[in-house]
């Protein structure tokens, strides 16, 4: 049950934690990943959950709309859980992340998979998309949980780079959390209570940029109608690691499949 009094009682602790987050997002992400000791369902990374049910939602969209003969790029791949899943569906999968520590961890966790590679790069940097297109030609792109942690100008830059990567034949499968309440009610929905904020959440509050919501309006701003066609979009359920005695933690999300116009 979401309770406004509990939300207010959490303010001092949340504010204290949030003060630790570096202002520069690249520094913040590198710091976050460099301090992660364990990943997976019992690990420290909030969004690194069981992928089964969530993946079923994406598999259908991939089969319907993506050319599975093209390579796929996992933009903002983190520790590469989804890059590895994608590698089973495309000839090759490249995970790209701005945090070198994330990329090193992803490579370590993917040692057994020959069709997976990882790269450190800022996907909001001008020209990043053109460079990847020069290397791979038209490619598909998967993005999970990256736009909602970027500010609007960076969202536009990322959208522009994705346009260069997909060329004429690639498509973008975008999946983002889209919780519509305030940041405190979001924390509460994930299991935070006054004096009891679960460890994966504490790490996120004190380490990475504050997430925003990302739905159709935010997508339209980052993927303007003049450059993109929406092939499908709608609600999706995104899984986070279980917290506070739960077996799973689900977050309302938004999915879009996009092609270049
Ligand atoms: C919420 S995590 C999601 C990770 C992964 N997509 C997943 O779902 O497991 C967001 C990821 O985006 C990465 N990221 C943030 N800004 C980025 C940027 N400008 N370029 C590339 N990666 C970025 C972060 O380092 C982090 O690993």
Image (tube, grey):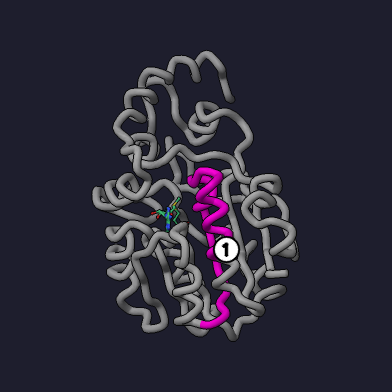
Magenta-highlighted residues:
137-161
Q: Is residue 159 found inside the magenta-colored segment of the image? A: yes
Q: Nearer the viewer, residue 223 or 250?
A: 223
Above-or-below relation of 207 to 141? above
Residue 167 within the segment the image draws in magenta: no
Residue at the far front in the pictured view: 126
Measuring 40% from the left and 53% from the top, which residue is drawn there? 41
Relative placement, left or right, of 34 versus 159 is left
Identity of the residue drawn at 50% across and 53% down: 146
The spot of residue 255 in percent (x, y) is 65, 56
Taking 4 as reference, is 233 left or right? Answer: right
The location of residue 39, given as percent across then percent down, is 33, 55
- Can you say which quadrant of the picture contains the N terminus? top right
Quarter of the rendered image showing ligand 1: bottom left
Q: Nearer the viewer, residue 145 or 226?
A: 226
Residue 242 left/right relative to 166 = left
The image quadrant that residue 76 belongs to is bottom left
**Residue at mark 1:** 55
């Amino acid at each position: 049950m979401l309770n406004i009094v509990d939300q207010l009682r959490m303010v001092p602790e949340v504010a204290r934690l949030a003060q630790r987050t570096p202002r520069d997002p690249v520094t913040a992400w590198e710091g976050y990943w460099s301090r992660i000791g364990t990943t997976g369902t019992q690990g420290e990374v909030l969004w690194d959950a069981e992928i089964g049910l969530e993946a079923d939602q994406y598999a259908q969209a991939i089969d319907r709309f993506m050319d599975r003969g093209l390579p796929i790029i996992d933009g903002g791949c983190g520790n590469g859980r989804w890059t590895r899943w994608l590698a089973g569906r495309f000839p090759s999968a490249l995970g790209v992340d701005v945090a070198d520590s994330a990329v090193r961890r992803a490579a370590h966790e993917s040692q057994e998979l020959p069709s997976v590679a990882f790269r450190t790069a800022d996907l909001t940097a001008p020209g990043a998309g053109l460079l990847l297109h020069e290397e791979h030609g038209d490619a598909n792109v998967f993005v999970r949980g990256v736009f909602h942690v970027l500010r609007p100008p960076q969202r536009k830059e990322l959208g522009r780079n994705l346009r260069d990567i997909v060329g004429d034949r690639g498509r973008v499968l975008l999946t983002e959390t889209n919780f519509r309440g305030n940041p405190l009610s979001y924390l509460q929905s994930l299991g935070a209570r006054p004096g009891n904020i679960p460890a994966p959440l504490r790490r996120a509050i004190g380490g990475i940029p504050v997430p925003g919501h990302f739905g159709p309006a935010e997508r339209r701003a980052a993927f303007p109608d003049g450059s993109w066609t929406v092939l499908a979009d709608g609600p999706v359920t995104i899984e986070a690691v279980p917290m506070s005695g739960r077996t799973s933690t689900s977050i309302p999300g938004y999915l879009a499949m996009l092609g270049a116009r």
